[in-house]
Image (tube, helix red, strand yellow):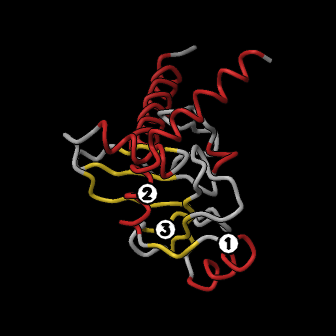
Amino acid sequence: MDKTRSNHFNKAFFLLAILTGMLMFSGVALADNDSCIHCGMLKAKYGHSWVIIEHDNDTLEGVCSVHCAAIDMALHTDKPVIKITVADYNTKQQINVDQAFWVIGGDKMGVMTARAKWAFSTKDAADNFIKKHGGKPATYEEVMTAAFADMQADTLMIQKKRRMMKKH
């Protein structure tokens, strides 16, 4: 390989490395093959409950559920949160937690919790869910209060399920 061709190859490789690094660390989007940093659940399977927490130091935490978001906030009290988005239950599109229409409970099993906490981008979608599956409307603050109140029982439930899975 001649020197000119080698220089072009090195420049191309360098640019590719820079672009890859920018995409990896820019937080542009979390891929569907990402997993929850606390429990390992895959975004591809739990995209309907996925939560993204942005801290003031520009780090993003992707978690599978409100339960794991509560764990993350409790573990990172030293990292103030500047933005939290949650997936719309129906579309899986991320929406701001304060703009979401929340439903607590109902007959659909929650993610990492016995008492489900679902977000919807419209009031109609939340109302339709309640008509079909039960539950009650809530605010984001009520959802997080419920997540922390459910933490002990949910943690014990998760541990029991994992012990049972190991046996089989």
Q: Earlier in the sequence, mark 2 or mark 1?
A: 1
In the image, taking residue 120 as reference, residue 52 lies left or right, namely: left
Q: Nearer the viewer, residue 88 or 138?
A: 138
Per the image, the residue denoted by label 3 is: 95
Per the image, the residue denoted by label 1 is: 134
Q: Earlier in the sequence, mark 2 or mark 3?
A: 3
Q: Residue at x 73, y 23 (%)?
A: 165
Dot 1 alpha-carbon crowd within 10 angstroms: few under 14, some 14 to 19, many 20 or more: some
Which of the numbered marks, if any, corresponds to residue 39?
A: none
Which of the numbered marks, if any, corresponds to residue 146?
A: 2
Q: Are marks 2 and 1 in contact (CB under 8 Å)?
A: no
Q: Nearer the viewer, residue 73 or 108?
A: 108
Image coordinates of residue 76 in percent, x first then y, are 27, 39
In the image, taking residue 10 as reference, residue 109 lies left or right, namely: right
Local secondary structure at mark 1? loop
Local secondary structure at mark 3? strand
> Is label 3 or label 1 in front?
1
Q: Quadrant of the N terminus?
A: top right
Q: Residue at x 58, y 55 (%)?
A: 115
> Mark 3 is on which residue type?
Ile
Give the CA distance from mark 3 to mark 1. 22 Å
Image coordinates of residue 18 in percent, x first then y, are 41, 35
In the image, taking residue 92 as reference, residue 65 lies left or right, namely: left
Q: Are marks 3 and 1 in contact (CB under 8 Å)?
A: no
Q: Nearer the viewer, residue 114 or 50?
A: 114
Local secondary structure at mark 2? helix
Residue that sits furthest to the front in the current view: 153
Dot 2 alpha-carbon crowd within 10 angstroms: few under 14, some 14 to 19, many 20 or more: some
The part of the image, by quadrant, that contains residue 93 is: bottom right
> Mark 1 is on which residue type?
Gly
Image coordinates of residue 16 in percent, x first then y, are 49, 34
> Mark 2 is on which residue type?
Ala
